[in-house]
Image (tube, grey):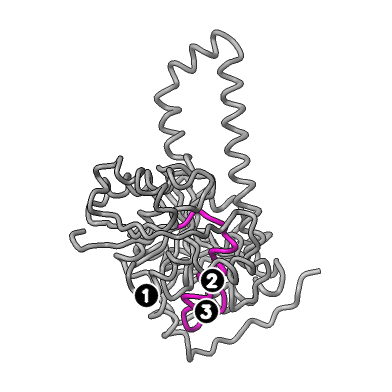
């Protein structure tokens, strides 16, 4: 990458901001020398942090803002009252063409509301979706929606499938991603009507995508598909269960290795293998959820992330911009716009 890539950062979003944000920017700059930043927030706090990191010299423009969106602010309130906040200004920079993407670890609801208001959705997409990758035994899987839309129509699920397919191609580097709809079983007659209708549309879509049918929750970690599609309620609950289970297993391992002197000796011998496992399952390496479906790139980092996780979120934003995430989605929906697809006539399961 030799061209200048400008990313707008919400310098005050996240539990450990602004230190975490500036640290993440420095890490990202080391990995991607062509990246530069518009950094929004309290200049008195940001300037000393930037000066301490030589790698950011000449690569950061700080723009002062007095307002900050708090974690407990309601999205509707933030949208109306926080127009001068660091979060809003970062999104405005994308709208104005000053930056190719915005990254924030702040309030998810407020970020979604502001992004949709400022950038609007791509033609053919009714609702943005939260998209991110998760580790599998074969690599990574793109999962959406992860919390933006609690209830979804068949059309919404189809839109998510198209967005996920483009994400898998641009970020995960999968040439022809496979797509599955999360359901309570893989049989065609199972699930509620919306899921079955979405499956019928995807089977007949004119787009060159590979729809494999229904999948179950455990098919994500097995790597059966590259893209897993579901509504925001199911996706968010599933993600939190997976994160909690990972922490539980790590806790069990710590307790087991502390249980006796033999166990401690076994830990010493197993430490290199455990380090590899820790690296593969570290959520910071998968940080950076896309607000897919917008006329611009907005990436949400985990609110409790550190500089490593935030730098990875910046990396996702760069990949989105460099590989044309938004134009590719627009192209796909342009092809879908005037295509009528019959929906399978199936009776709901009791």
Q: Name the spot of residue 194 as percent of width and height, x first.
A: 67, 74
Q: Which residues are magenta?
A: 104-129
Q: Earlier in the sequence, mark 3 or mark 1?
A: 1
> SS for tag 3?
loop
Q: Secondary structure at mark 2?
A: loop
Q: Nearer the viewer, mark 3 or mark 1?
A: 1
> How much space separates mark 1 and mark 2, taking CA atoms?
20 Å
Q: Which mark is residue 128?
A: 2
In the rendered view of the protein, which quadrant contains the N terminus?
A: bottom left
The answer to whether 93 is drawn above or below residue 206 in the figure is above
Mark linked to residue 96:
1
Please indicate whether residue 293 sits to the left or right of residue 197 in the image: left
Q: Residues within 10 Å of mark 1 (few under 14, many from 20)?
A: few
Q: Quadrant of residue 40?
A: bottom left
Question: Residue 276: which quarter of the image?
Answer: top left
Q: Is residue 112 magenta?
A: yes
User: Dot 3: few (<14), some (14–19), or many (≥20) neighbours within 10 Å?
Assistant: many
Residue 110, percent from left and from top: 58, 64
Q: Residue furthest right?
A: 350
x, y percentage for residue 78?
A: 59, 65
Residue indicated by mark 3: 125
Is label 3 in contact with label 2 (beta carbons under 8 Å)?
A: yes
Is 345 above or below relative to 95? Answer: below
The quadrant the C terminus occupies is bottom right
User: Do tag 1 and tag 2 residues touch (Cβ < 8 Å)?
Assistant: no
- Res. 303 mark: none
Q: Position of residue 107 (x, y in %)?
A: 57, 57
Q: Which of 105 and 81 lies nearest the eye of the viewer?
A: 81
Magenta stretch holds residue 51: no
Do tag 3 and tag 1 residues touch (Cβ < 8 Å)? no
N-terminal of the pair, mark 1 or mark 2, is 1
């Amino acid at each position: 990458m030799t061209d200048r890539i400008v990313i707008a950062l919400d310098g005050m979003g996240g539990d450990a901001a602004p230190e975490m944000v500036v640290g993440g920017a420095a890490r990202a700059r080391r990995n991607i020398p062509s990246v530069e930043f518009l950094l929004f927030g309290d200049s008195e706090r940001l300037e000393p942090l930037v000066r301490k990191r030589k790698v950011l010299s000449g690569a950061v423009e700080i723009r002062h803002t007095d307002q900050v969106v708090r974690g407990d602010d309601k999205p509707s309130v933030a949208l109306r009252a926080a127009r001068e906040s660091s979060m809003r200004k970062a999104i405005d920079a994308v709208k104005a063409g000053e930056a190719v993407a915005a990254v924030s670890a702040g309030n998810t609801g407020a970020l979604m509301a502001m992004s949709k208001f400022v950038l609007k959705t791509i033609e053919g997409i009714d609702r943005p979706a939260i998209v991110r990758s998760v580790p599998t035994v074969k690599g990574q899987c793109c999962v959406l929606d992860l919390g933006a839309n609690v209830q979804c129509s068949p059309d919404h699920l189809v839109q998510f499938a198209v967005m996920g397919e483009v994400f898998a191609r641009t970020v995960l580097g999968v040439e022809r991603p496979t797509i599955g709809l999360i359901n309570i079983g893989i049989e065609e007659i199972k699930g509620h009507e919306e899921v079955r209708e979405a499956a019928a549309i995807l089977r007949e879509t004119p787009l060159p995508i590979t729809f494999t049918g229904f999948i179950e929750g455990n098919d994500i970690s097995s790597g059966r598909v590259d893209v897993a599609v579901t509504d925001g309620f199911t996706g968010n609950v599933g993600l939190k269960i997976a994160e909690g289970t990972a922490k539980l297993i790590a806790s069990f391992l710590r307790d087991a290795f502390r249980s006796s002197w033999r166990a401690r000796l076994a830990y010493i011998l197993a430490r290199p293998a455990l380090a590899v496992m820790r690296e593969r399952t570290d959520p910071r390496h998968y940080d950076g959820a896309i607000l897919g479906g917008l006329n611009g790139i907005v990436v949400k980092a985990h609110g409790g992330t550190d500089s490593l996780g935030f730098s990875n979120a910046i990396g996702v934003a760069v990949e989105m911009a460099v590989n044309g995430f938004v134009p590719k989605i627009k192209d796909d929906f342009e092809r879908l716009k005037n295509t009528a697809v019959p929906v399978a006539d199936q009776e709901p399961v009791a």
